[in-house]
Amino acid sequence: MQANKQISALLKLIDDPDDEVFDTVAEQLLHYGREIIPNLEQLWEVTSDESIQERIELLIHRVHFQDLQQEFLEWSQSKNPEILRGAILVARYQFPDLNIASILTQFDQIRRNIWLELNNYLTPLEQVNVFNSILYNYYKLQGHELTEREPKHFFINQVLESKQGNAYALGVLYLALCELLDIPIFAIDLPRQFVFAYIDTLHHFYKQDDNDDGVQQIQFFVDPLNGMVYTQKDVDTYLRKINATDKENYLKPLLSRRVIYKMLEELALCYRYKREEQKAEEIQQLMRIVADMNDK
């Protein structure tokens, strides 16, 4: 009861013309977390002043963002963060009330359709052909270049709805499916590209060995934008073309945290391109959370 009285008192001060008073009220309301959102939404509905409505909308966004930061921290701190969960968190920045159950249902249906076509006798290339046939032919996923600078192409819920996305959104979907279906496909840190490598052993991921650089383990490369397969020769030619000298580092697999970090990095650039500086700064705050765990 006491909490309800305090909330009511604080809500009455939201329209105070003094910005310092509003900032103080906002900080106190944020301490209540998500439970304050229904109160704010109700206040918005009975408020006719657009400037006050904007303040309320800002508060609701700050509550959602505060909650999202905590979820990113928990995801990053987990021992083996799932890449699909990371992609869902990225989407929740734009869609805080995201229907996660619906995403997981759609994802599981795709996984099942691929699983039904796989068997132990398929070669690595045949496995990838199964993936590509179902994703790009049956589901008709369509890739868009990052240079289009469209935020909607980053969010996995919109990819599943519209069947369109960029290399990162399509890529995390591809990687998550491989993770569940035990297909050894992993993202690598190729300069200016987001591509995958099919690697036939995980030994060199977890054990550093001076005699094992892992390069010979790679069977071929896959572009998640369209499923195109590239050979080692294709990649070597590309690296020479851009004068890349540290070849072995470029061919090392990326962990889920690093993939999501790079995805956020591109999203921040996208918002900056559109001059949405506040959104870009908030995405960078999420990047810092993930980066802190990458460094540990």
Image (cartoon, rainbow, N blue to C red):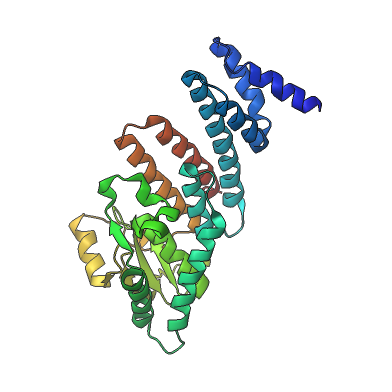
Q: Quadrant of the N terminus?
A: top right
Q: Residue at x 63, y 35 (%)?
A: 38
Q: Residue at x 33, y 35 (%)?
A: 272
Q: Is residue 201 left or right of residue 151?
A: right
The image shows residue 176, relative to residue 151, as above or below, that is below
The front one of 131 and 99 is 99
The image shows residue 197, relative to residue 166, as above or below, that is below
Q: Quadrant of residue 66?
A: top right
Q: Is residue 16 left or right of residue 152?
A: right
Q: Is residue 200 left or right of residue 226?
A: right
Res. 253 in view: no
Q: Which residue is drawn at 47% across and 21% down?
A: 50
Q: In which quarter of the image is residue 24?
A: top right
Q: Position of residue 246 (x, y in %)?
A: 31, 57
Q: Which residue is drawn at 24% across and 66% down?
A: 236
Q: Position of residue 286 (x, y in %)?
A: 50, 41
Q: Where is residue 232 in the image (x, y as percent from the top left)?
A: 27, 71
Point out the residue furthest to the right here.
1
Point out the residue furthest to the bottom here.
121
